[in-house]
Image (cartoon, rainbow, N blue to C red):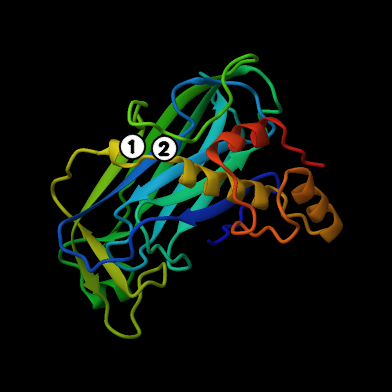
Amino acid sequence: MKTVGFPFSLLTAALWTCGAAAAQPSFPVAIELDVVFPRNDTYAPVPAMPIVFALQNANKFGPLLQQLSWRLSYANESDYIDIGIVDVGDELDVNSDPYFIVLSTRRLNMTEGSWSLDWTWVWQTCLPNATSALISAHQGLQDPIFMGSIAFATKNGAKQPNLTMSDTDECSTSSAVINFASVLDLEPGVSSYNRVQSCPVQANSTPPADPCRVRVDAATASNISATMLTHLCSYSDPARQKKCLSDNGLPSSGSLSAAPITGFLFLALLSALYLN
């Protein structure tokens, strides 16, 4: 588990992984981004609304620069109420599949409304003819950009947010895929501007998205919810942090292994979250 810092004090984030170990690449390799939560649905207002993305096949080769930015706004309005950036780059150990990016926002303030979650996924890639010399001169690079959005609503009396996905639940409707033909290994002492010693070459064609491959079972939802709550309680004041964890049923150490939370309890924890 690793923590990502944000430039906004009210944002909290955690990265949580599950699945198989890293494998050697066999090109082409398609990496997919899916919005796991929220879905295009209506939920009861909660103190902290989860925002969860999944990366598929990100474990196929070493660290590569990806930047995921998101913003939350009222539906059909340009002004945002919350915003964040996740740098999925060389400082992260992406070694499992799928790779979950777990975020949350408190800016909905327990209110009813219609909302839009807009996201932008940016990669650094190399052109097919790029060389280490070109990279050293800051040439031969390109930045593919993918954008998407998901609409959802909050309304009193609606169902509580629930990350668990059954086989009959709708798959993500907001996804993007980037396909790589190869990876250029840079010469020693040469690195692209993200300090990574390799640079992926984008393929000419891209397979369709397969969001139904990402299913969140009760165990996964339990770990995601516990991770989110642990980081929501990451106060600099130890006494305040201990009280927040205790109020929400987590041990003062914040250890996930010591605090198993079922997918069912995830609903109760979100609806009764104490953030003092």
Q: Amino acid at mark 2?
A: Val
Which of marks 2 and 1 precedes in the sequence? 2
Give x and y (percent) for residue 14. 56, 53
Is residue 26 toward the left or the right of residue 241 in the image?
A: left
47 sits to left or right of 136 = right
In the image, residue 178 sits, relative to residue 119, either above or below, namely below
Q: Nearer the viewer, residue 86 or 61?
A: 61
Which residue corresponds to the image point at 61% horizontal and 17% vertical from the top-left? 113
Q: Type of residue at label 1?
A: Ser
Is mark 1 in CB contact (under 8 Å) with mark 2? yes
Pointer 1 local density, CA inside 10 Å: few below 14, some 14–19, many at least 20: many
- Mark 2 lies on a secondary structure that is strand
- The residue that appears at 44% across and 23% down in the rendered structure is 40
| Vertical comparison of 263 with 20: above or below | above
The residue closer to the viewer here, 181 or 45, is: 45
Q: Which residue matches tag 2?
A: 35
Q: Position of residue 67 (x, y in %)?
A: 43, 53
Q: Quadrant of residue 201?
A: bottom left
Rendered location of residue 28, percent (x, y): 15, 57
User: Would residue 180 appear left or right of 46 to someone viewing this image?
Assistant: left
The residue at which mark 1 appears reads as 175
Relative to 24, is 74 above or below? above
Q: CA distance from mark 1 to mark 2?
A: 6 Å
Give the camera-side residue of 231 and 142: 231
Quarter of the image where the C terminus is located = top right
Q: In the structure shown, which secondary structural element does the residue marked by tag 1 occupy?
A: strand
Which residue lies at the image location 46% right of the left edge and 23% below the top edge?
151
Can see residue 69? no
Vertical placement of residue 162 versus 70, above or below:
above
Q: Badge 2: how crowded within 10 Å, few (<14), some, or many (20+)? A: many
